[in-house]
Image (tube, helix red, strand yellow):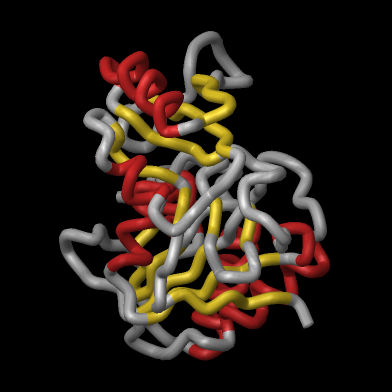
Amino acid sequence: MEWNIENNYQEWNKEITNIEEKMKLATKVASFVKDGDTIGFGSGSTSFLAIKEIAKKISEEGISITAIPTSYEIKMLCNSLNIPTASIIEKKPDWSFDGADEVDQNGWLIKGRGAAMYKEKLNILNSEKVYILVDNTKIVDELGKKFSIPVECYPESVNYVTEQLNKLGATECALRMAKEKDGPVITENNNFIIDCKFEKIDKNLEKELKLITGVIETGLFVGYSNIEIVKVM
C-alpha cells in the first residue's frame, strides 16, 4: 500500500545559488551513470540537482541503479523519485558523488554545512572513485579562510572536545545552533557539531582531530587519492 499524501521532497528548501553552474555539474555526473551501478549519493544543493538529473536518465533510458544516500533528506528524495536505496551495510558503492563547501589547489575539502559528513565520509572511503562537484565559488587558495571545520561529537563530550580543539590551536570554536528551533543542530547520528577555525590547516590536522575522544567525524577531507574534482569549464 502506498502513502496517499502530497510531499515536497523534490523541492529544495531554499534558493539555490549559482544554479546554472550547478546544473552543468548535475548533467555531467548524470552522464557517468550506468545500468546496474550502486552509487553513493551526497547531500547539498548540487547533489540534489544531480539526483534529479539521474532520475531523468533512469526514466528516459530504462536503466536501474541503487543509491546509498548520506542523509534522510536525500533518502526521501530518492524515494519520491523511485530510485531504490540501500545502506552502506547492505551494499558497497561502485562510485560516489558529492559537493563541497571549499576545495583548495591540493584537492583538500571542507564539507559539513548539511551536518551529514559522517555518512559522506563513509561513502567516500568505500568508493573506488568519488566525483566532487564544485562551482567556481567553492574553489579557494587556502582552506579554512571562508568556512569553519565542522567537528561532529558525542553530545556529552562537547566541553572536553572544545577544550582539546583549543589545545590543538583552534582560534574559534562554536557549538552550531539550529536556526529553526531552540538548541543545537542535531546530526543524522544524533550528535552535536562544533564549528572551529584554525589559522593553518596541514596534512595532519584531520587525523589529530579524529584522535580526540568524543569526536565522531570531521568535515575535513585531506589527501584522498580516489577523489576527482569536477569543475565547471
The answer to which of 38 and 103 lies nearer the viewer is 103
Looking at the rendered structure, the number of numbered marks drawn on it comes to 0
Give coordinates of residue 125: x percent, y percent.
31, 66
Give coordinates of residue 86: x percent, y percent.
27, 62
The answer to which of 127 and 56 lies nearer the viewer is 127
In which quadrant of the rendered view does residue 229 lie?
Answer: bottom right
Give coordinates of residue 32: x percent, y percent.
52, 87
Relative to 107, residue 117 above or below: above
Relative to 83, residue 191 above or below: above
Q: Can residue 42 be seen in this snapshot?
A: yes
Q: Is residue 15 left or right of residue 190?
A: right
Residue in the image at 44% along x and 49% along y: 76
Residue in the image at 22% along x and 30% along y: 213
Residue in the image at 75% along x and 77% along y: 232
Give coordinates of residue 60: x percent, y percent.
57, 86
Q: Is residue 214 left or right of residue 96?
A: left
**Which image quarter is the C terminus in?**
bottom right
Relative to 15, residue 157 above or below: above
Q: Can residue 186 be seen in this snapshot?
A: no
**Hey, which residue is sitting farthest left in the picture?**
89
The answer to which of 154 and 207 lies nearer the viewer is 207
Residue in the image at 78% along x and 65% along y: 136
Q: Is residue 181 left or right of residue 128?
A: right
